Amino acid sequence: ELDIQEEIEKNWGEIHRYLSALFKTTGLDEILAEELAVLPGMEEVSLLLYINRYARGREFDAILLDCAPTGESIRFISIPTTLDWYVNKIFKIEKTLVKVVRPVASRVYNVPIPGDEYFDAIEHLFERLKGVEKLMADPEITSVRLVTNPEKIVLKETQRAFMYFCLYRMNIDAIIMNRVLPPKITDAYFLTWQENQRHYRELAEKYFSPIPIFPVNLFRSEILGYQSLKSLAGQIYGQNNPLERFFAGQPYDLTKENGIYCLKLKLPFAGKDHVELNKVSDELIVRVGSFKKNLLLPRKVAASKSVKARMEEDYLTVCFEGENHG
């Protein structure tokens, strides 16, 4: 776990100092201004710096990153793209503009204007991050493993995470189904719970196919210490090597062309007469015979009022047009 204060000194010194000075001009207490100057994303960028450094230096056989819940994880993987956009589209203009107006602005406004050191620090930070987005999107290097529970809300959240990681072209190679009640539990008190879990495990198979799902039984106590972790690993992977890639490829591909969103899904051996599509709220349901796949759609795509589909060789392409504001 990162010490954010230490990381600020190492990676954000000049940027943090400027932001603190800026907040202090609003009349905030110095300590509060320093706290507010720790902006969302600073910790995530620091993590990316470590990942990039370790990957380049080949210091470890594998890097395991335990991510936060969906929202923060998505922000984490989107940071390289966002920073790249900022540096290439805004940063140079901003730096030039500030250099021009600084002599006048510093005399007129009682607000600190960022100096060259501030912009140099941002530039240096971005240089150290270069290449990390390719590293994370390379299926030969990076895999994502999603952890879920056989429960309605948790499974829905995992679907959303699954969708976003796919959109960022990150390779999801396994789903860990956690907290499954062991079959040896036969107490009547747990029968309904077991039945519910069985139902949601079946749904998970439909949602995430062809990604393999590894079930993990509910442990008697919290997983702490080497022996507990070893037991957990044994349940998940058995004789498999945890560093093995269990799935390679994109379950589906969503692109936008000329204002139209198109989702491409591989359906080998499925003729167009055997494919049935239904869009229910924010889900696209694809049926081929007894096979059914539920795909959670981004909100913008789910709002489309027109859905068209076509089969091309082994691929089903579904296009979404127009927005339904009703």
Image (tube, rainbow, N blue to C red):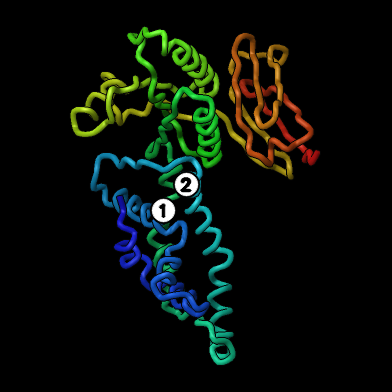
The amino acid beneath tag 1 is Glu
Q: Is residue 253 above or below residue 202?
A: below
The amino acid beneath tag 2 is Glu
- Of the residues under marks 2 and 1, which one precedes in the sequence? 1
Where is residue 188, by image quadrant?
top left
**For the residue carrying disc 1, how many other residues have a C-alpha within 10 Å: few (<14), some (14-19), or many (20+)?**
some
The residue positioned 53% from the left and 18% from the top of the image is 203
The residue to which callout 2 is attached is 72
In the image, 15: left or right of 95? left
Q: How far apart are the alpha carbons under marks 2 and 1?
A: 9 Å
Q: Position of residue 177 (x, y in %)?
A: 41, 24
Q: Nearer the viewer, residue 211 or 32?
A: 32
* Labelled disc at residue 185: none
Q: Position of residue 243 (x, y in %)?
A: 30, 31
State yes or no: discs 2 and 1 in contact (Cβ < 8 Å). yes
**For the residue carrying disc 2, how many other residues have a C-alpha within 10 Å: few (<14), some (14-19), or many (20+)?**
some
The residue positioned 41% from the left and 32% from the top of the image is 145
Q: Secondary structure at mark 1?
A: helix
In the image, 285: left or right of 228? right
Where is residue 309, by image quadrant?
top right
Q: Position of residue 32 (x, y in %)?
A: 42, 70
Q: Position of residue 272 (x, y in %)?
A: 71, 16
Marker count (numbered)? 2
Single out the mark in the foreground, 2 or 1.
Answer: 2
The residue positioned 34% from the left and 19% from the top of the image is 217
Q: Nearer the viewer, residue 309 or 284?
A: 284
Q: Is residue 133 above or below residue 244?
A: below
Q: Secondary structure at mark 2?
A: helix
The residue to which callout 1 is attached is 44
Q: Residue furthest front?
A: 189
Where is residue 280, by image quadrant?
top right
The residue positioned 36% from the left and 7% from the top of the image is 186
